[in-house]
Amino acid sequence: MKAIVVDNQRLLWGEAPQPSCGPGEVSIEVAATAVNRADLVQAAGGYPPPQGASEILGLECAGVVAEVGEGVARVQVGDEVCALLAGGGYAEQVVVPAGQVLPIPRGLSMAQAAAIPEVFATAYLNLYMEAALSVQEKVVLHAGASGVGTAAIQMLNTTHNPCFVTAGSAEKVAACVALGAQAGFDRHQGSFVAAVSEWAGDDGVDVILDPVGGAYLTDNLSVLGLNGRLVLIGMMGGAAAEVNLAQLMMKRLRVVGSTLRARPIGEKAQVMDRLYEHVWPQFESGVIKPIIEATLPLADAQNAHQLVAGNDTVGKVVLTL
Ligand SMILES: NC(=O)c1ccc[n+]([C@@H]2O[C@H](COP(=O)([O-])OP(=O)(O)OC[C@H]3O[C@@H](n4cnc5c(N)ncnc54)[C@H](OP(=O)(O)O)[C@@H]3O)[C@@H](O)[C@H]2O)c1
């Protein structure tokens, strides 16, 4: 089959072996996939796929079921589906455990559906399951205009959680506010502490979803209120930092590290089931939509990666076949 192959960090439209569909698995003929920040890191030689996962890039897709393995009742050949992948999406065909496959929300295109699984699953898992967010709790989202950020803003609106974003320009902050964030801060203007503290008031912030890591740790801990939770999902600002343990202890803070890709299949299926129950109806009523910056042919993945690396995108870059 045709797939994107990485050759000396260049993404080329080449040949790869077709994956075979085992028991409990679903083979999908891919119509669209989408770029995630992790793909850029993997293409550069970091973030290797978990054991047993495809070496091909691509953490999500939409397409048509081509084959189902023994014991799969969830979908049938010919169904239009989208899926959360541990890898393999940048290809004509991909095989995935059945629990990570969902029907395309009614009314959405293949390109729109391909922009959903990774970022909505990440935002849902970390806000509602890891941080156990309650109604009205205040949330800070770093990289608010990212794929994950734009998914999170919209879900937080539907669960009545005020949110504040940081992003890389006044325009990106404005895009987040248009999506439903209450306020935001341009990260190139210095520390976000004063702006967040003014927004959050005396009680501070309840939950922070942070893909930045080291560079933000001290400031994150300082804006959290009593019983605050910091969920770390990335290290774009470095992996090392010094922690003020007294602050952690006195405010009874919790710091949670979380990755989606390496989780057991059963846990990923649980996240997808929750998305289907709580978020799919919102896609189908149009309350929530995948935010797409651009759509390019999959063979043009190199340009799509450059677009994402430029940090100017709002939401997702989709790749179609
Ligand atoms: N742990 C997990 O399971 C998991 C799963 C999915 C994603 N993630 C992480 O979540 C983050 C967002 O992913 P995505 O695919 O949605 O990303 P994306 O759409 O590519 O957006 C990432 C944004 O992060 C901002 N950024 C880049 N470098 C930064 C830095 N050094 N400090 C602060 N902000 C920086 C940029 O926006 P601004 O310039 O506007 O700030 C950039 O547009 C990534 O870090 C990704 O690795 C983690």
Image: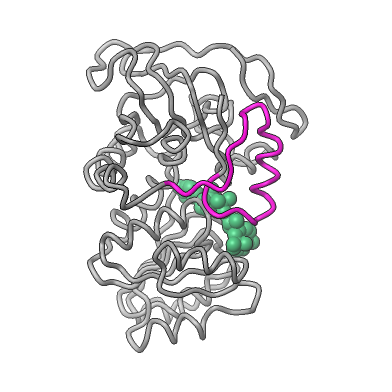
Q: Is residue 196 above or below residue 41?
A: below
Is residue 198 rendered to the left or right of residue 77? right
Q: In the rendered structure, which segment of residues is drawn in magenta?
A: 290-316
Residue sticking out furthest to the right: 8
Residue in the image at 59% along x and 79% along y:
191
Left or right of residue 98, residue 28 in this image: right
* Res. 298 image quadrant: top right
Quadrant of the image occupied by residue 260: top left
Classify the position of the N terminus by image quarter: top right
| Residue 44 in the image, given as x and y percentages of width and height | 70, 40
Rendered image quadrant of residue 239: bottom right
Point out residue 230 in the picture as x, y percentages from the top left corner: 41, 66
Which residue occupies the foreground of this view, 99 or 226?
99
Kindly tell me whether residue 236 is visible in this rendering: no
Q: Where is residue 77 in the image (x, y as percent from the top left)?
A: 32, 12
Left of 71 or right of it: where is 244? Answer: right
Queried whether the magenta region covers residue 307, the answer comes back as yes
With respect to residue 295, does 130 lie above or below? below
> Which residue is more in the foreground, 290 or 28?
290
Q: Which residue is drawn at 54% across and 75% down?
A: 185
